[in-house]
Amino acid sequence: MRTRRVGTILRSVTDSTAASGSSQQAGSPDHSAQALALVDEWLPLPDIAEQTGLGISKVRRLVEDRALIGFKHGSPKVFKVPALFIDGDAPVKNLQGTLMLLADAGFPDEEAIVWLFTPDDSLPGRPIDLLRTGSKKEVRRRAQALAV
């Protein structure tokens, strides 16, 4: 099920990048491009430190502990995290456990971001939006099902 849905997303992003003149090969699994297309705002770690009031070393620890994920992109390439992963002065409360489930299901960080930001027909919206409202149960149930 995961492969079919992610494949559909991939084809849609690949088709739109091909139409825009990108040299990306059709069908290549470029989860970074998908994530960039789905996420509106990204924050580099120093911005997260400033927004949350945490020291930069604490923010780096959150990444090491997988409470936050992201990847390097832009010019110059800088490690950035989706802004919706931050809720006020901390990471979204139920994000870390969900990220662990996705990692256990074999998702690399970029693909986990794609999954979190893609609307799911079996959920009322995107998984990240549900996590931000505290609705972790159904999101985690879907994430666990991906590991099967």
Image (cartoon, rainbow, N blue to C red):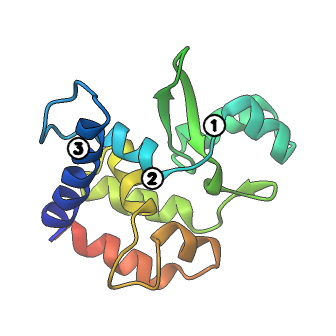
Distance, label 3 to label 2, CA atoms, is 13 Å
Quick one: SS at disc 3? helix
Horizontal arrangement in the rendering, residue 4 relative to residue 52 (left or right): left
Q: How far across and down, in percent of the image, does residue 7 sit?
A: 16, 56
At label 3, the amino acid type is Thr
Image vertical order of residue 89 relative to residue 121, above or below: above
Q: Earlier in the sequence, mark 1 or mark 2?
A: 2
Q: Whole-percent x and y of residue 38?
A: 45, 52
Give the amino acid at mark 2: Leu
User: Residue 118 vs residue 64: left or right?
Assistant: left
| Crowd class of label 1 (few under 14; some 14 to 19; many from 20; radius 10 Å) | few
Q: Secondary structure at mark 2?
A: helix
* Location of residue 9 with respect to 110 vertically, above or below: below
* Labels 3, 2: front one: 3
Compare residues 56 and 38 and report the one nearer the observer.
38
**Where, quadrant-wise, is the N terminus in this rendering?**
bottom left
Closer mark to the observer between disc 1 and disc 2: 2
18 left or right, relative to 108: left
User: Disc number at residue 61?
Assistant: 1
How far is mark 3 from mark 1, CA to CA?
34 Å
Question: Residue drawn at (76%, 35%), measured in percent from left and top?
Answer: 47
Q: Earlier in the sequence, mark 3 or mark 1?
A: 3
Foreground disc of the pair 3, 1: 3
Query: In which image quadrant can residue 116 be found?
Result: bottom left
Judging by the rendered image, the residue that carries numbered circle 3 is 14
Residue in the foreground of this view, choosing between 95 and 17 = 17
Query: What residue did someone put label 2 on?
Result: 38
The three-letter amino acid code for the residue at tag 1 is Arg
Could you say where residue 146 lies in the image, as x and y percent from the top left? Answer: 23, 68
State the CA–CA distance, disc 1 to disc 2.
26 Å
Q: Residue at x 24, y 54 (%)?
A: 12
